[in-house]
Amino acid sequence: MGRIYVDKYTGKIERTDLYFVRLTLKDGTVYEDLEPRKLFPITNHTMYITLLDSHEKELGFVRDLEEIDEDSRRALEECFEEYYMIPKIKKVLKCVDKFGVLKWTVETDRGEITFDIKNRHSDIKHLHGTNRVIIRDSNDNRYEIPDIENMDPHSDRILFSYL
C-alpha cells in the first residue's frame, strides 16, 4: 500500500491520545495510533504533515491543514501543541556573556527560564522574511520569539546585539 493523501474528501482525523490520532477513510478503513509530525515545523508549520504508524513508516500525508475539515485540523493542532511545545519568549530579563557562553534569563509563556547558548551565530536564528526568532540552547531546547517587533525596549536592547 502506498501513501494515503488525506484531505476533507478522503478521510477524517481524530485525536485519541496525547500524541496519537486515528485516521478513518471515506471507505470505512480505520488506522489507529498514528503519530502526526510536521516535516517543516519551523518554516512551514501548516503544510506537509506526515502520519506515521507504530513502526515509524509513513502511512498518510496531509499537504495543507487548509485541505482537511475543521475537526481534523483541530485534532492535529492539539497534538502539535503538546509535541512541539516551544516556549514563547515574552521578555528578555538579562543576558550575561561568560567565557563565550551566553547565559539568558527570559520570561516565557511557561514562566521564567534560564538557559545557556554556546554559539550565538548558529543558535540564534532570525527567520528570513518574518519577525520570528528561534533560539536553541546548549541542551538543544528551542525557544521562540514570535514577533521581535513586539518586544519591550529592554529586551530590544539586549536582542539588538545578537541579531
Image (spheres, helix red, strand yellow):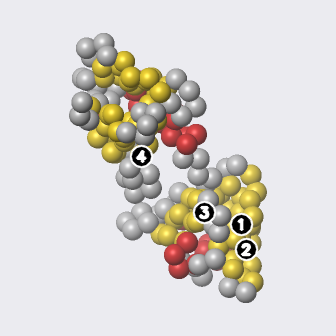
Q: Secondary structure at mark 3?
A: loop
Q: Earlier in the sequence, mark 1 or mark 4?
A: 4
The residue carrying mark 1 is 115
Give the residue at x 54% y 34%. 19
Q: Are marks 4 and 3 in contact (CB under 8 Å)?
A: no
Q: Is residue 110 above or below residue 104?
A: above
Q: Is residue 45 left or right of residue 98?
A: left
Q: Earlier in the sequence, mark 3 or mark 1?
A: 1
Q: How many numbered marks appear?
A: 4
**x then y, percent, for residue 112:** 76, 57
Q: Earlier in the sequence, mark 4 or mark 3?
A: 4
The mark lying in front, picked from 3 and 2, is 3
Viewer-proximal residue among 119 and 4: 4
The residue carrying mark 4 is 38
Residue farthest toward the front in the current orientation of the protein: 55
Answer with the quarter of the image where residue 58 lies. top left
State the CA–CA distance, disc 2 to disc 4: 30 Å
Q: Earlier in the sequence, mark 2 or mark 1?
A: 2
Q: Amino acid at mark 4?
A: Lys
Viewer-proximal residue among 87 and 151: 87
Q: Is residue 105 visible?
A: yes
State the CA–CA distance, disc 2 to disc 1: 6 Å
Q: Amino acid at mark 2?
A: Lys
Circle 3 Cα neighbour tier, 10 Å, few/some/many (<14 / 14–19 / ≥20): few
The residue carrying mark 2 is 103
Q: Secondary structure at mark 4?
A: strand
The residue carrying mark 3 is 140
What quarter of the picture does the N terminus occupy? top left
State the CA–CA distance, disc 3 to disc 1: 10 Å
Q: Earlier in the sequence, mark 3 or mark 2?
A: 2
Q: Amino acid at mark 3?
A: Asp
**x then y, percent, for residue 116:** 69, 71
